Amino acid sequence: MKALVIVEHNNKSIKTSTFSTITAASQICESVDALIVGNQLQEAVDEIKKANDVKKVYVIDKDGLQNPIAENLSTHILEFLKTKDEYTHVLTPSSTFGKNLSPKIATKLDVQQISDIIKVFDSDTFERPIYAGNAIAKVKSNEKIKILTVRPTCFEPCGQTSNVEVENVNLESVDLSSVSFVAYDESKSDRPELTSAKVIISGGRGMQNGDNFKLLEGIADKLGAAMGASRAAVDAGFVPNDWQVGQTGKIVAPDLYVAVGISGATQHIAGIKDSKFIASINKDEEAPIFKFSDYGLVADLFEILPELEKKL
Amino acid sequence: MKALVCVKRVIDYNVKIRVKTDKSGVETENVKMSMNPFDEIAVEEAVKLKEKGVIDEIIVLSIGADTSQETIRTGLAMGGDRGVLVKTNGQEIDPLNVGKIIKSVFDKESPDMVILGKQAIDDDCNQTGQILSSLLDCHQATFASKVEVNDDKTINVTREVDGGLETIKISIPCVITTDLRLNEPRYASLPNIMKAKQKKIDILDINELNIDLKRRVETIEVNEPPERKPGVIVNDVDSLIDKLKNEANVI
């Protein structure tokens, strides 16, 4: 058995999700290769070839592949797979990059993908969350080749102390798609992204209005935290939609999640329960959030937040 | 232009789900069901495009048992023109086959765009749109947070990707999957709910589509997630900071 990991990168550096996916692959197969597709990849190749657990890095470096257009990546990866029939598993990080791309590879191979695996049992049996992690399904693939996406937060990134063999693959003859890339606006925020942050502080309806979210900013600054919100706070118009944490928003798994003025509705809990530690501040001691919190503080957030900011 | 919007009937997002005691799945008997929230956003987007004069017909498609007609009616009450139900026995269907079923409806209806939620909140697969566009060999734009149809019928779609927003330009026919920020779905008004009852829903029998529905990925068992250890209530800010620093080691 042999696994191929599709590398997530920005042509310059490798996303950590890739190293976690390599770890997952190495739990399935003894032999793991990596495939990186992009343009002007030198720096990125220098980084990925350090990955322990990888035997060989294949590189498709071609003008027109600088942006991760799924149509382009999938046709090149499929062409590559045609020349290598030894792979039994193809793994991609379950980031927006992998979610966008991997099902296209699976479909063209007429294979049913397994999304978002969080645990490996054996070469065809895996665990994946359903209902936003409110239930865990153990699933078995009967496909000839397993196409998997991997939840990066569930696998430690592999070490990066090797120097593995690199081979360039020439696929000039593969046509490029007519999808055109228009722009990429990187989030301007100085704060980390919700889905990769180590610490998150979120506010709920208890914040009472959007202005009061400023009370969380100073604390977020001190903790290097991302800022989020409950659906109730988003629905009330306190903060933008993309702050929403929960089943219908972002699913997060930070080391520390601080819930402020959040009662703990089911759909919010579903988005945070993989956090290592949850601390919550709420004036209602009956609030369901306390049942899911490692540390609860029953208090008026308007008194507590300034004190917390000062003392951190 | 014509739009096909795909909607899935799922357990309402506010319901606390229960895993069946025999571990075969999640309890759906006597549980409130609703349209998948991401699909509601898809319907809303199609209706908005119709209001702008870009789209002239919206077909609302669902795959499921008879009860999925209710979900289609919800879409029709929001502004869909007619419905199609691909009727099943209520069995679970692999996303790849869902893609194949939608394709067979696509082939019959020839829409210019298919709009659907980026994922269903029950199986959380996030695959159907990507599968469909691959089967159709057409352009895809997943996780859309903004859709702008240009005069030449190309479409600029802004996509929510990790770390920012990506905009791509695609051509019809195409598949667009919706993310949260795209819009806020409307509530259907009572008169529109009444009107939706008169709208037509065509029913197709899944067995007539000649798709092998044998499952390629079996669910062996479904379990409750590991419980969180019970926590403690602290008395003040100082002890909270102390616990986070010295016990949890997270700050």
Image (cartoon, rainbow, N blue to C red):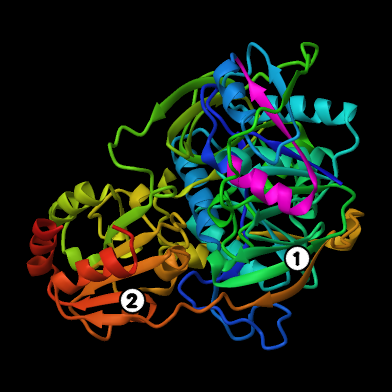
Quadrant for residue B122, please give it. Answer: bottom right
In the drawing, what numbered circle is on residue A289? 2
Task: Find residue B165 and report its horizontal and vertical position in percent.
Answer: 43, 33
Identify the residue shown where x is 18% and y is 63%.
A207
Disc 1 residue type (three-letter): Val
On screen, residue A93 above or below A70: below
On screen, residue A269 above or below A182: below
Chain letter of the residue carrying label 2 = A
Residue that numbered label 1 is attached to = A139
Identify the residue shown where x is 82% and y is 25%.
A79
Quadrant for residue A76, please give it. Answer: top right
Residue A29 belongs to magenta span: yes
- Give, as a single range, the part of the protein colored magenta: A19-39
Relative depth, front residue between A84 and B217: A84
Task: Find residue B140 and report its horizontal and vertical position in percent.
Answer: 63, 34
Relative depth, front residue between A96 and B140: A96
In the drawing, what numbered circle is on residue B213? none
Chain letter of the residue carrying label 1 = A
Give whichever of discs 2 and 1 has the lower sequence position. 1
Disc 2 + disc 1, Cβ < 8 Å: no
- Mark 2 lies on a secondary structure that is helix
Number of marks: 2
Identify the residue shown where x is 61% and y is 66%.
A130
Q: Which quarter of the rendered picture does the C terminus of chain A lie within?
A: bottom left
The residue carrying pointer 1 sits among few (fewer than 14), some (14 to 19) or many (20 or more) residues within 10 Å by Cα, namely many
On screen, residue B37 above or below B160: below
- Mark 1 lies on a secondary structure that is strand
Let me know if residue B28 appears in the view: yes
Disc 2 residue type (three-letter): Ile
Residue A152 belongs to magenta span: no
Task: Find residue B26 and report its horizontal and vertical position in percent.
Answer: 65, 78
Q: Are marks 2 and 1 on the same chain?
A: yes
